[in-house]
C-alpha cells in the first residue's frame, strides 16, 4: 500500500550537533509535505512545509529536502537544542480535499 | 493566545458510557478535523467538517460521531467507548481544503476508558 514511513523510530543527538530526520513516501501523486513537531502531551505543531515543485526549503534552523526521484523527505535541524526534543512527523497531502496522511514519527532526544 | 482549544485536557469515562469531547477555534477557519492518536502512533483522521458538510473517513467506526453547531465549535461523541478507544483525540482546523492548507492543532484530549 501507499504510505509515509520513517527509517528510524528514535534518534539521539548531542546538543549543538545537527539532526537529520528522514521520511520515505511511496505515493508519487503527493504534492505537498509538512513536518510537524509534537512535544509530550501536546498537539502537533507545524514546523515547515514544501511543495513538490521544490527540492529544498529553509526556515529558522530547519531545512526540508525533497527528493522526488527516490520519494524521500528529510528534516535537518541545525545546532540542535534540548527544546528540540520531541516526536517529529512527516505528513503528505495526496491532493484533492485536505487530508494529511501522517508517517509513523521519529522521537528525537537531545543529550545536553 | 490559544487558537484551537480542546476541553477537557484529560477525560476519564467508563466502558460503554457515552462521552463528548469539545473543540473551539478563534481562527474562523472553515474546516475542522478530528484525529485519533494512540500511544506512540501517528494521528489518524476520523472525519472533518468543511463548514457544515460532514466528511467521514471510510474506516471510522460508527461509534464515533461529530457535531458542528457553528463555525467555532465542533464536538466528538463516542457513543459506547471501548477499551480500544483510549487515545489522544486531536482537533485541528484549516482555512480551506486545498492541497497546501496548513493544519492548526489543539493540545488534545487524553481519553481513558475504565
Image (cartoon, grey):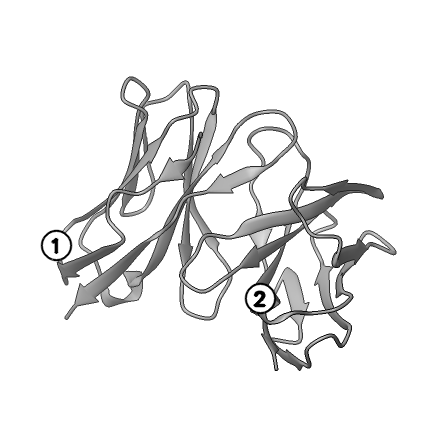
Q: Quadrant of residue B39?
A: bottom left
Is A32 left, or right, of B106 in this rendering?
Answer: left
Give residue A17's mark.
Answer: 1
Q: Of B2 and B106, which appears nearest the observer?
A: B106
Q: Is residue B64 above or below residue B80?
A: above
Which residue lies at the image location 64% right of the left edge and 60% below the top edge? B4
- Secondary element at image label 1: loop
Give residue B111's mark.
Answer: none
Location of residue B11 in the rendering, given as x and y in whole percent from the top left corner:
64, 78
Please identify the quadrant where the N terminus of chain A is shown.
top left
- Secondary element at image label 2: helix
Please identify the quadrant where the C terminus of chain A is shown.
bottom left
Q: How many marks?
A: 2
- From this viewpoint, is residue A76 visible? yes
Residue density around tag 2, few if under 14, some if 14–19, many if 20 or more, within 10 Å: few
Is B100 left, or right, of B82 in this rendering?
Answer: left
Is B110 left, or right, of B53 in this rendering?
Answer: left
Q: Is residue B8 above or below residue A87?
A: below
Q: Is residue A52 above or below residue A88?
A: above
Of circles 1 and 2, the one toward us is 2
| Distance Cα–Cα, label 1 vs label 2 | 40 Å
Q: Label 1 lies in what chain?
A: A
- From this viewpoint, is residue B72 visible? no
Q: Is residue B16 above or below residue A77?
A: below
Residue indicated by mark 2: B84
Amino acid at each position: 500500500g501507499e504510505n509515509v514511513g520513517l527509517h528510524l523510530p528514535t534518534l539521539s543527538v548531542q546538543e549543538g550537533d545537527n539532526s537529520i530526520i528522514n521520511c520515505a513516501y511511496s505515493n508519487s501523486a503527493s504534492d505537498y509535505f509538512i513536518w510537524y513537531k509534537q512535544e509530550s502531551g501536546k498537539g502537533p505543531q507545524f514546523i515547515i512545509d514544501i511543495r513538490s515543485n521544490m527540492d529544498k526549503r529553509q526556515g529558522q534552523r530547519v531545512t526540508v529536502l525533497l527528493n522526488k526521484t527516490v520519494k524521500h523527505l528529510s528534516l535537518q535541524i541545525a545546532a540542535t537544542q534540548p527544546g528540540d526534543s520531541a516526536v517529529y512527523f512527516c505528513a503528505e497531502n495526496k491532493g484533492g480535499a485536505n487530508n494529511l496522511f501522517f508517517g509513523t514519527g521519529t522521537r528525537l532526544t537531545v543529550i545536553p | 493566545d490559544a487558537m484551537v482549544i480542546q476541553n477537557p485536557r484529560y477525560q476519564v469515562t467508563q466502558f460503554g458510557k457515552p462521552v463528548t469531547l469539545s473543540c473551539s477555534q478563534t481562527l474562523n477557519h472553515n474546516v475542522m478535523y478530528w484525529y485519533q492518536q494512540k500511544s506512540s502512533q501517528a494521528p489518524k483522521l476520523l472525519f472533518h467538517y468543511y463548514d457544515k458538510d460532514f466528511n467521514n473517513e471510510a474506516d471510522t467506526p460508527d461509534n464515533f460521531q461529530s457535531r458542528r453547531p457553528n463555525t467555532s465549535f465542533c464536538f466528538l461523541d463516542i457513543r459506547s467507548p471501548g477499551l480500544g478507544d483510549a487515545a489522544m483525540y486531536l482537533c485541528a482546523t484549516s482555512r480551506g481544503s486545498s492541497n497546501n492548507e496548513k493544519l492548526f492543532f489543539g493540545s488534545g484530549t487524553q481519553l481513558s476508558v475504565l
